[in-house]
Image: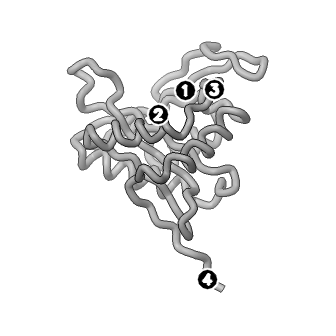
Amino acid sequence: MRLAETVIRPAREGDAQAVCDIYAFHVAHGTATFDAIAPDAAQWTRKIGEIAGNGWPFLVAAREGEVLGYCYAARLRDRAAYARTCENSIYVAEAARGTGIGTGLLAHLIDAARACGFEQMIAVIGGGEPASVALHARCGFVHAGRLRNVGFKFGRRLDTVYMQRDLT
């Protein structure tokens, strides 16, 4: 029996609920995001449109029509000097962790961000989440810094880890 192929493609408006569900799980159960309340599907629809409208990549990984993960890149900051630097965001459905979905998504995102003219990609990893740090390291990111005790979630203080990848 052959497993269905995973397709990585640009996000569509119809993906917003699945993206919402994936992120909501991580908000409720993880420290990779410091959000306490997850955005709803309407907010995700707007975000997908805004990112795509700027010409930046917002990708999903889907298998048999089911979205198993998503990622996007957006400008790190609004100031002009940051125009060639992006921040990435990547989340995988709990059931798809450890399957290579994250690695595939991030590899595609790196290529798409480079094609958009970005020269540096920054990962801001809440709680220094070990799985996210490992994923980014596998994809060529290097440790760029740590802010200690800047977050508080689930009754404990959390660091933020910064990782960086040169796209040139």
Residue lying furthest bottom: 1
Label drawn at residue 161: 1
- Quick check: marks 1 and 2 in contact, CB under 8 Å? yes
Dot 2 falls on a residue whose secondary structure is: strand
Q: Residues within 10 Å of mark 3 (few under 14, many from 20)?
A: few
Q: Is mark 3 on a helix, strand or loop?
A: loop
Instruction: Give the alpha-carbon distance from disc 2 to disc 4, as whole Å.
Output: 34 Å
Marks 4 and 3, the one that precedes in the sequence: 4
Colour mapping? one colour
* Distance of label 1 from label 4 (alpha carbons): 38 Å
The numbered mark, 1 or 3, whose residue comes first in the sequence reads 3
Picture disc at residue 123: 2
Residue 9, image x, y percentages: 40, 59
Q: Which mark is residue 2?
A: 4
Image quadrant holding the N terminus, namely: bottom right
Question: Please, which residue is most extreme toward the front here?
Answer: 42
Asked whether disc 1 touches disc 3, contact meaning CB atoms under 8 Å apart, the reply is: no
Residue at which label 3 appears: 37
Task: Please state if 61 lies on the left or on the right of 95 as rendered.
Answer: left
Q: Which residue is drawn at 65% across and 53% down?
A: 97
Give amino acid for label 2. Answer: Ala
Circle 2/circle 3 CB separation < 8 Å = no
Say which amino acid is labelled 1: Val
